[in-house]
């Protein structure tokens, strides 16, 4: 044989975990594959948001005063509140994964429902913020209105604001849907300490969405508040 | 991702730290630190992010490969930001080169 | 012994019949075949657009199309060929089919995500077809702003979204390959026993997951600018069109390495088989794949040399662009050393390898011309650039893809094609290709700009040569369709290893069963072991 391949005894179809997919050999291998897959997906998300952060970084350097003034128009209380809500949701998410790890079905469902609730609160606040922006004409484009001397460059700020927070909110919505599915599965008893990978993977995604906001909040809301 | 189960106290502590850091971020924004406002804000955000990644996302207890994936994403993001900034930051540096004849 | 070869009774192609068994399959091999059909259709479409371009350019005047129509032709040629043919090509067809057996696995890590990636590809193509039937798009495949984001009145958004969606197909394929190669190798298959084809796809997958998201967000930015009037790239509001170019090329330069690396993987496999020798400098070739992937990410602004970037950064990018040629050269040297004192032969896959050598060499070297700042000022946006990238993408990537298709066709279908016709086709492709694109180097150097439907009279002779060559090339590409299809019914039964090649994929029957291996293979030896015993087994002596 050209590369000296030997054939082992057949992998007998012995009893295996019901959740083991047949192209994997062990649950461990399956879990490691899922974990690596999710982390690689998050890597793509870093680069995805990264392009927007690049644009933001450059334009803020060039048009600092325009950005500072536009930033002050954002509601720091709502933004700060949302930051607290989202970090709290990361806590509840982490506790939910932990409950799945330790076979606590009811607690898993509890923490996951709380996480979803906090996510919806976040989205609700964003809706309030966006509505306000629409009202005062801060949506860039033909309906933009500003009396500032930097009105033109402020459109760039708001373009980035809406694109970045909009993309983030879209990820939140997907996260809420994802969490709802996971919560339902947890309620139905699909997870235990030997198999809770989907909860963990969903948790990684949720934490990532929180991470993006951890950067968005200071960059968008806190450009220059000390005047 | 390991089977390591963090005690709840770890999660609560990290949450507490994140709250404190958020408060500091907001507070610092109201103080005039000159050119340091932005680095301070980003620095605190990065510290918060590190806590989330290490503890909420369990990277501290994860395999080397997971840590490599995290590092790789940051490295290439850095390349994107740094090389583009290099262009914009060096525009108009005519003094570096001899003038065209 | 050869004439008693029979097709296996049960294999992946007849394991389940009907649309549902194909459209809902989780078998990586069936997904590969569906990709093969899909990208062949797209290649034909892209070729038709190219035909339009070359026919127009037979005469100096713009007499076949209006200028705007011509712009649509070269734009859509580029969009189809880049996003819907070249990027998927070798990975989605050959990578999908071969990576699991090459590492002794039953399937990829995520079979359903593999199927999803195919669906997403179709969805992206559907968006493109919508744009096509709605009147096309004329921005160039590079979508430069502010023309694409503001002024163009063609179907920019559906086309851009089509490219965006197909990008997710690419990301999912890359992600699947990375996890598969990391986590599903057979016992004994250490990293440095992997076939170089696998190394090449590993490096390609890195690029796919790291780079594609950046062009994805860039397309989103153009789309929101166009749809909502946002101002990210609008100069009247302080936006910077060059920022678009930075973001676009951050992906699109590594993208060309997505196109060439898998082809290089094919070359390694074919060349060792048909020189009956192990690859010279295996670890150098393996590491050079990684180096190309990493280096490919730091050189993008050589596409922006005349766009207004700073002189200082232009010098940095120029220097880095020179250095990215080094790992490619390492590969070419090692392949040449593989040939040295090997028992080389001239089967069709090997003809494509020889063609690849010459054409990739020219394409790569002319890349150095373009990386040279002073020269680039002169030849940027001329046919010199067009010739350079076609030498690499067609002379390199497509030759590699076709060589691979010919090499593994017996494995995928269980049949041999007509060696006579396939050799004719390979020669026609080589001759037609050079006739099409070599004159373009001269045209570009003489100053003919690209993306123009009319040109000064003195350029006509070379343009006519180029268009004639395109005709020959087209015939060369059509022939395989004929003899491959013919082989499915009438081709000689191939048997498991008609070439006497090493590699675990040749241990499977041809065509393979759905589960690839009935028993878990265990690897003891190094790859590419060619011995007289193996040659006798394959009836080559």
Image (cartoon, rainbow, N blue to C red):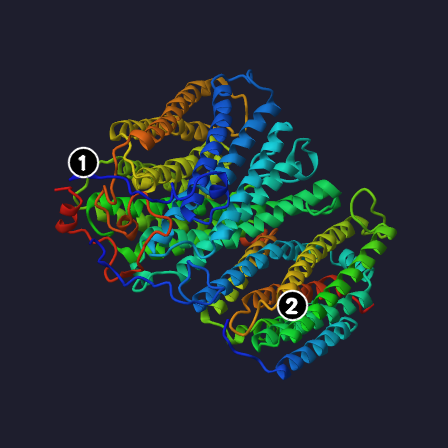
Residue C137: tell me if it is visible. no
Specify the quadrant that holds the N terminus of chain C.
Answer: top left
Q: Where is residue C493 in the image (x, y as percent from the top left)?
A: 25, 36
Residue C178: tell me if it is visible. yes
Residue C3 image label: 1
Q: Position of residue C102 (x, y in %)?
A: 33, 53
Residue A220 image label: none
Q: Tag 2's secondary structure?
A: helix
Q: Tag 1's secondary structure?
A: helix
For the point 80% across and 52% down, which residue is it? A150
Looking at the rendering, which quadrant does residue C408 occupy? top left
Position of residue A7 in the picture relative to residue C70 (left or right): left
Q: State which chain disc 2 sits on.
A: A
The crowding category of the residue bearing disc 1, from other C-alpha atoms within 10 Å (few below 14, some 14 to 19, many at least 20), is few
The crowding category of the residue bearing disc 2, from other C-alpha atoms within 10 Å (few below 14, some 14 to 19, many at least 20), is some
Labels 2, 1: one chain: no
Specify the quadrant that holds the C terminus of chain C.
Answer: top left
Q: Position of residue B33 (x, y in %)?
A: 73, 72
* Residue marked by disc 2: A187
For the point 53% across and 42% down, which residue is it? C121
Looking at the rendering, which quadrant does residue C158 occupy? top right
The answer for how far apart the CA atoms under marks 2 and 1 are is 61 Å
- Please, is residue C157 above or below residue A137 in the view? above
Depth check: give the residue in front, B56 or C79: B56
Depth check: give the residue in front, C297 or B13: B13
For the point 55% across and 44% down, which residue is it? C120
Q: State which chain disc 1 sits on.
A: C
């Amino acid at each position: 044989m050209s590369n000296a391949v030997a054939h082992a005894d057949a992998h007998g179809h012995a009893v295996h975990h019901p959740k083991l997919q047949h192209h994997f050999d062990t649950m461990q291998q399956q879990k490691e594959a899922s974990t690596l897959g999710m982390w690689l997906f998050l890597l793509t998300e870093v680069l995805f948001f990264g392009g927007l952060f690049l644009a933001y970084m450059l334009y803020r350097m060039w048009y600092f005063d325009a950005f500072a003034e536009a930033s002050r128009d954002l509601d720091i209380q709502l933004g700060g509140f949302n930051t607290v809500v989202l970090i709290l949701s990361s806590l509840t998410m982490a506790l939910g994964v932990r409950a799945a790890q330790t076979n606590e079905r009811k607690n898993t469902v509890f923490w996951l429902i709380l996480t979803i609730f906090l996510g919806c609160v976040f989205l609700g606040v964003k809706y309030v913020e966006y509505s306000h922006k629409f009202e005062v004409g801060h949506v860039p484009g033909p309906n933009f209105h500003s009396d500032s001397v930097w009105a033109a460059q402020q459109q760039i700020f708001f373009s980035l604001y809406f694109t970045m927070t909009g993309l983030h909110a879209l990820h939140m919505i997907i996260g809420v849907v994802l969490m709802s599915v996971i919560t339902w599965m947890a309620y139905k008893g699909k997870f235990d300490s030997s198999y809770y990978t989907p909860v963990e993977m969903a948790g990684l995604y949720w934490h990532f969405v929180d991470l993006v906001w951890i950067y968005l909040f200071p960059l968008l809301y806190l450009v220059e508040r000390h005047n | 991702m390991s089977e390591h189960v963090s005690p709840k106290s770890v999660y609560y502590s990290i949450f507490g730290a994140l709250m404190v850091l958020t408060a500091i971020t907001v507070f610092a924004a109201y103080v005039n630190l000159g050119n340091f406002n932005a680095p301070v804000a980003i620095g605190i955000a990065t510290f918060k992010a590190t806590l989330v990644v290490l503890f909420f996302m369990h990277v501290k207890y994860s395999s080397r490969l997971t840590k490599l994936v995290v590092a790789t994403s940051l490295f290439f993001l850095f390349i994107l930001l740094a090389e583009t900034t290099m262009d914009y930051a060096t525009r108009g540096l005519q003094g570096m080169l001899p003038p065209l004849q | 012994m050869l004439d008693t070869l029979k097709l296996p009774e049960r294999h992946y192609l007849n394991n389940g019949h009907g649309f549902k068994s194909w459209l809902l399959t989780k078998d990586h091999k069936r997904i590969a075949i569906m990709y093969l059909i899909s990208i062949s259709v797209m290649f034909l479409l892209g070729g038709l657009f190219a035909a339009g371009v070359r026919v127009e350019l037979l005469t100096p005047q713009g007499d076949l199309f209006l200028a705007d129509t011509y712009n649509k032709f070269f734009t859509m040629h580029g969009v189809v060929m880049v996003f819907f043919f070249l990027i998927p090509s070798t990975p989605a067809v050959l990578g999908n089919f071969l990576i699991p057996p090459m590492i002794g696995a039953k399937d990829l890590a995520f079979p359903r995500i593999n199927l999803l990636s195919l669906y997403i590809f179709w969805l992206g193509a559907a968006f493109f077809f919508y744009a096509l039937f709605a009147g096309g798009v004329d921005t160039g495949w590079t979508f430069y702003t502010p023309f694409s984001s503001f002024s163009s009145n063609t179907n920019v958004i559906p086309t851009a979204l089509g490219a965006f969606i197909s990008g997710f197909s690419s990301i999912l394929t890359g992600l699947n390959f990375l996890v598969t190669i990391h986590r599903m190798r057979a016992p004994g298959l250490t990293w440095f026993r992997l076939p170089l084809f696998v190394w090449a796809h590993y490096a390609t997958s890195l690029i796919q997951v790291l780079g594609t998201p950046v062009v994805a967000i860039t397309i989103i930015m153009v789309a929101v600018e166009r749809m909502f009037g946002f101002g990210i790239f609008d100069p009247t509001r302080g936006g910077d069109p060059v920022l678009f170019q930075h973001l676009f090329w951050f992906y699109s330069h590594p993208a060309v390495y997505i196109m060439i690396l898998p082809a290089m993987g094919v070359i390694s496999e074919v060349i060792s088989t048909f020189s009956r020798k192990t690859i010279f400098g295996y670890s150098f070739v393996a590491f050079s794949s990684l180096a190309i992937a990493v280096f490919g990410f730091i050189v993008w602004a050589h596409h922006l040399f005349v766009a207004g970037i700073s002189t200082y950064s232009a010098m940095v990018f120029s220097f880095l662009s020179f250095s990215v040629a080094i790992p490619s050269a390492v590969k070419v040297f090692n392949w040449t050393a593989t040939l040295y004192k090997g028992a080389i032969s001239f089967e069709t896959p090997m003809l494509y390898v020889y063609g690849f050598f010459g054409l990739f060499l020219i394409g790569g070297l002319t890349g150095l011309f373009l990386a040279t700042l002073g020269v680039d000022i002169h030849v940027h946006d001329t046919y010199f650039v067009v010739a350079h990238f076609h030498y690499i993408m067609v002379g390199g990537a497509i030759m590699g893809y076709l060589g691979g298709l010919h090499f593994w066709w017996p494995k995928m279908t269980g049949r041999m094609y007509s060696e006579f016709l396939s050799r004719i086709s390979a020669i026609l492709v080589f001759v037609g290709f050079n006739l099409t694109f070599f004159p373009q180097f001269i045209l570009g150097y003489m100053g003919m700009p690209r993306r123009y439907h009319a040109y000064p009279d003195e350029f006509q002779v070379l343009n006519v040569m180029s268009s004639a060559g395109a005709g020959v090339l087209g015939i060369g590409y059509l022939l395989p369709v004929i003899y491959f299809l013919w082989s499915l019914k009438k081709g000689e039964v191939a048997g498991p290893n008609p070439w006497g090649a090493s590699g675990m994929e040749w241990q499977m029957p041809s065509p393979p069963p759905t589960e690839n291996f009935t028993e878990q293979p265990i690897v003891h030896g190094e790859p590419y072991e060619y011995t007289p015993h193996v040659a006798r087994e394959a009836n080559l002596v």
